Amino acid sequence: GISGQPHCITAPTQTFSSNTLRAEQNETMGLTAVLVGGISGTGMHMMTNALRKVPLSRSPWYHVSCFFVGAWAGNAYVRMEESLVQDINQIRQDRGMPALVGSNAWIRYSSDEK
């Protein structure tokens, strides 16, 4: 850790209902991230085709592969952001500070914890 003491990253203690709510939110957020990432990947390939002034539907296998790469990137971003919030909360806990407001909520920085 920062103060020279080792620390492990653990999730904050939550009640069963909070865990269930969080799991539902993660599924929705994961699906949203996958769809947004996938559509962005396909859109980027179509944009490169437009910039090259070739038909947008040229190389359709690239549309599919860019969709999957974008979906992976969207999902990886969500996991990375969640792990960063957990790391920050652990550091704040080690220093005796409260967790970030809204860490367990769908909207990250809302004033009410769920």
Image (cartoon, rainbow, N blue to C red):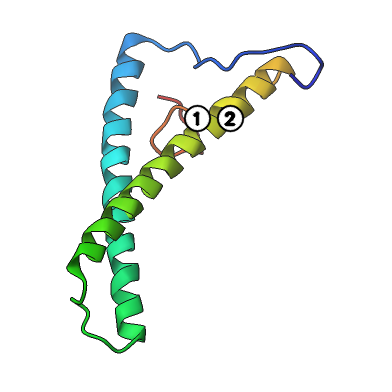
Q: Amino acid at mark 2?
A: Leu
Q: Amino acid at mark 1?
A: Ser
Quarter placement of the N terminus: top right
> Is any part of residue 99 visible from this angle?
no
Residue bearing mark 2 = 100
Question: Of residues 5 and 85, which is closer to you in this image?
Answer: 5
At 26% across and 86% down in the image, what residue appears? 54
Secondary structure of residue under mark 2: loop
The percent coordinates of residue 72 (x first, y second) are 35, 46
Residue bearing mark 1 = 103
Secondary structure of residue under mark 1: loop
Q: Is residue 110 left or right of residue 100?
A: left
> Is any part of residue 64 visible from this angle?
yes
Is disc 1 surrounded by few (<14), some (14 to 19) or many (20+) residues within 10 Å?
A: some
Quarter placement of the C terminus: top left
Indicate the quadrant where residue 91 lies: top right
For residue 30, which numbered disc appears in the image? none
The percent coordinates of residue 49 (x first, y second) are 30, 80
At 52% across and 30% down in the image, what residue appears? 83
The answer to whether mark 2 and mark 1 are in CB contact below 8 A is yes
Gap between marks 2 and 1, in whole Å?
A: 6 Å
- Vertically, is 15 above or below 77? above
